[in-house]
Image: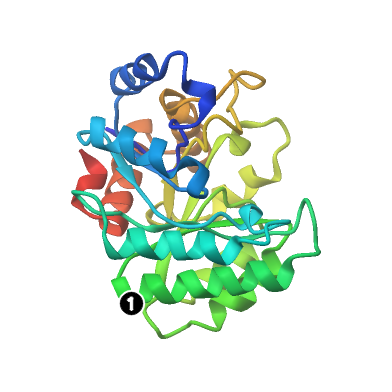
Amino acid sequence: MLTDTHAHIYEPEFDGDREAVILRAREAGVGRMLLPAIDSGSHERLLALCAAHPECCTPMMGLHPTSVNDNPRWREELDAVRRLLDCPPAGGFCAVGEIGLDFYWSGGFRAEQTEAFRCQIEWALEADLPIAVHTRAAWPEMVRIVESYRGRGLRGVFHAFSDTLESYRRLKACGDFLFGIGGVVTFKKSPLADTVREMELRDLVLETDCPYLTPVPHRGERNEPAYVRFVGAKVAELKGVPFEEVAAATTENARRMFGPGAER
């Protein structure tokens, strides 16, 4: 049984065949899909999908860092996140996410993104929830912030991990953290492959980040949760272990971090 720990199947890219996508995922052995939030523009779609498919879809709640950029109302977006965290849907949220830092598109909102990130970390600590962390073009800043919470019980997953072994080791030293491995690991000459060889299987979870970052052999197409099996197969190849061992270990890692609903 596989778990896709990061899937945006509520997004418009799936409007034409969402039910078929879910069926293909189940047929491929994906028992649970964890769905991170982006901002209030998609909260309704996210929650409706999870309500319609509680057997396989579990929501997170948070404000994506790029939704802070060029948004004079980003604090109102944070308020919407807080209201939902305070009054969660049936079954609750499995994490505060996706939250984090993204300076790829613009470095002009560092202060605002950092404030939003730290605010949501505090909410996760209050609620005893893990965090699902987005990082792009901001790994040094991310490591420093997470290190500042060492000893406070912060835990979670670094979604789409793509940095160095040094960052992996520094982040591991900060608490109970897992590292999401997605389609990038399957790309030809991906430096992530060498990093994954050295990472411990007990520290990894699998993800698609669909509809983005589609793994080989479907690179260039829309990604979907069924393709998480290609990520698992690549990790198994890199680690020199059977695919079934990777599937079992990463699903157990997800269950431990996100709760018992994460492995159905």
Is any atom of residue 53 visible in this view? no
Name the secondary structure under disc 1.
helix
User: Residue 243: percent from the left, percent from the top?
Assistant: 38, 32
Between residues 127 and 208, which one lies in front from this camera angle?
Answer: 127
Q: How many marks?
A: 1
Between residues 157 and 110, which one lies in front from this camera angle?
Answer: 110
Examine the image and state in which quarter residue 73 appears.
bottom right
**Vertical comparison of 72 with 185: above or below:** below
**Vertical comparison of 184 with 88: above or below:** above
**Vertical comparison of 149 with 194: above or below:** below
Residue occupied by mark 1: 126
Looking at the rendered image, the quarter that the C terminus falls into is top left
Between residues 263 and 64, which one lies in front from this camera angle?
Answer: 64
Between residues 131 and 114, which one lies in front from this camera angle?
Answer: 114
Which residue is at 47% across, 83% downward?
150
Colour scheme of the rendered structure: rainbow
Which residue is at 25% across, 36% downward?
51
Is any atom of residue 152 visible in this view? yes
Tell me the crowding category of disc 1: few under 14, some 14 to 19, or many 20 or more residues within 10 angstroms, Cα based: few
User: Residue 211: percent from the left, percent from the top?
Assistant: 55, 29
User: Residue 134: percent from the left, percent from the top?
Assistant: 57, 55
Is residue 48 rendered to the left or right of residue 179? left
Looking at the rendered image, the quarter that the N terminus falls into is top left
Which residue is at 41% across, 85% downward?
151
Amino acid at pointer 1? Glu
Examine the image and state in which quarter residue 95 appears.
bottom left
Which residue is at 19% across, 49% downward?
91
Is residue 56 rendered to the left or right of residue 109? left
